[in-house]
Amino acid sequence: MKFFVACAKSLEYLLADELLALGAGKATAATAGVNVEAEPALAYRAILHSRLASRVLWPLADFPCENEQDLYQGVHAIDWSAHVAAEGTLAVDAHVSGPAITHERYAAQRSKDAIVDRIRAEHGTRPSVDVDDPDLRINVVVRKGRALVSIDLGGGPLHRRGWRQSQGDAPLKENLAAAMLIRGGWPKIHAEGGALLDPMCGSGTLLIEGALMAADEAPGLLRWRGVRPSRWLGFDVALWQTLVADARQRADAGRAALKPVFFGADNDPTALHAAMANADRAGLAELIRFDRKAIAALQAPGAARGLVVCNPPYNQRLAADEALYRELGDALRKAVPEWRASLLCGDAELAFATGLRATKKYALFNGALECALILCDPILPPVREARAPAPLTEGAQMVANRLRKNLKKFKSWRERQQIGCYRVYDADLPEYSAAVDIYQEDEGERRQFLHVQEYEAPATIPEADTKRRFGELLAALREVFPLPREQVATKTRARGKGGSKYGRMDQAGQFFVVREGAAKLRVNLFDYLDTGLFLDHRPIRLRIADEAQGGRFLNLFSYTGVASVQAAVGGAIQTTSVDLSATYLDWAAQNLALNGVSGPKHRLVQADAMKWLEADRGTYDLIFCDPPTFSNSARAEDFDTQRDHVRLLRACVDRLAPNGLLLFSNNYRRFRLDEAAVSEFATIREISPKTLDPDFERNPRIHRAWELRRGR
């Protein structure tokens, strides 16, 4: 049969070789995965034994799909009773490209609707949604006018081995760690008696993965610990149990022969504590030696030969100092000159800064960030001095000129309005498609930070051109803003039609305080796709501060509570902030406390905003409502701004005081207000142009906004 094994971008050829070694008849590398032809048992072996795979997708149906109705009907046509019990649980992951269906969450929602509608029609009941641990995880891909529906045989991301509970600032995924070890030749080096050293070990990922690889222990053994990876009704339990028993026998023999040849060092005691906890959970505490040690103090661990494997800090969430890389290279040449090294560096410049001669170089993607993996065999003396920065290309110079022009253009407005956080560039040159925001710290060193969001390029643009252009944009930023790397947050963000994608990135905890008007606010440029402060809503929030005095304020879909802070600072006697996310409400609480706002008159409510609003009986003088385009959280009703806005606005207006004001905004670019329906209960006026400051005037579609008052 044919099926697809997904992996991180840049691991495709390694994965194809691994699958062939596991017994695949044919394994062909594709984008972010491998197309496999093999007996069904190979799919089960892959989810148990593959160190590189992200998911194993078992196909159910492939059908033409030109619109959402085709998607619904195609999914509905599948006999889902053969795959999940009527009282079971499911989750749908969707991936879309092309003009037919442009929003992944909407595609997932419609697919889920089709499944539960069919099962309800057949059984009178329906499965519920469980995004964390479903009985059945379904993968839907819509591309080039066709839809492919598959079972996620492993039940979720396979890089999660089951031993990691503690992690450092920027944890390396286990399958990328495996790729570094394989590229470095670790299996052969271990077989020849070599040791493994990570001089910047962080939470220990590379060492633990290397030890388990040396023990021939299948990565799925710890992950599932006696349970099967999927409760899909078609899952071959007997085959799985046979494979697990064989893998356990091999792992027991491998662990019995394993010697303590694994050495880790780090200068951060918190990271070392996490590494030791992870090693203990993996059952390797007695085999890996961890030391608190600076790079300059690195010593040979006592083995004649081995592999140095290291993921030094390089990205926007950690310090990436070229001096640190030079120090690393010097330490390795001094301590283990005859060893091999496999080093994952942020870019070619940082790799060059080590002073080490790379015998091979590979591009690896750590998430969305392209990195340089260099192999040094053995570690040789430096071959050249660090080179001076290259002059800007013509394109980079164009971007630099535009940045300087915008800085000059906004200067008098910023100084007059005392604005420290603003957008300085927003795809002004279309081929350099990114948004660049400046955040000025309000306390301490009053540092300046850059927040760079790369927009998703059209599919017609070659990937090499996209990479080159983004690199040129970053070069222009370094020219205009000579900031340390740790003060520049660089993210890839897909700007999907119909909404934005938000998600957790890291856990670095790098919060700092900025000012907007009279309010102080906590932002985080590094841990999330969004920063906690939507800059385009600045005029609306400052208006709220002006109009909230003496009134009762309601903030629906409140996010980090910035509008509530502005209302409170502006003199509101009461604020209520409603959001489903405990993380955002905690952030909102910290924002309020930062401004000396506390007490029962300033409520934070964790709830589905629509349900809460329709049940509430309070009265408010000022309401701000900025809903997401879509929401299909398992803890809330499915919400669609276009479909549900009349119901939402009616419920808001019902809560307005006689002279109250509702400010409604959303960023769905295809949104069409049903003025006829809304005018039955409210007077309405669009105010979109008045809600954009000069830094967003060149992007008038970033949001639209309206005023609503009770109908006369």
Image: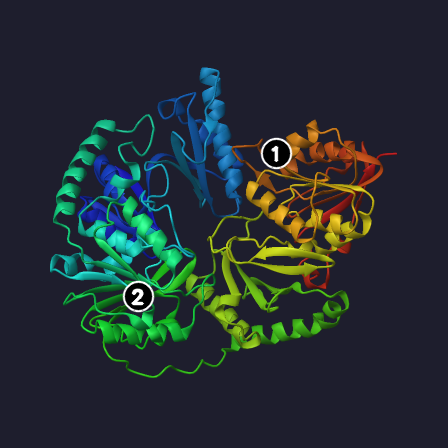
- Identify the image quadrant of residue 188: bottom left
Closer to the N terminus: mark 2 or mark 1? Answer: 2
Horizontal and vertical percent position of residue 408: 69, 74
The label number, if any, that marks residue 308 in the structure image: none
Dot 2 lies on which element?
strand
Q: Is residue 470 above or below residue 680?
A: below
The residue at 31%/44% (across/down) is 161
User: What count of labels does the image hold?
Assistant: 2
- Residue 641: image location, x then y, percent: 64, 39
Gap in Å between the C-alphas at discs 2 and 1? 46 Å
Query: Could you tell me which quadrant the N terminus lies in?
Result: top left
Q: Residue furthest right?
A: 712
Q: Which residue is mark 2?
A: 343
Whether 604 is drawn above or below 293: the answer is above
Q: In x, y percent, where is residue 200?
A: 33, 63
Q: Out of 303 and 643, give the one closest to the viewer.
A: 303
What label sits on residue 608 in the rendered view? 1
The one nearer the camera, 655 or 523, is 523
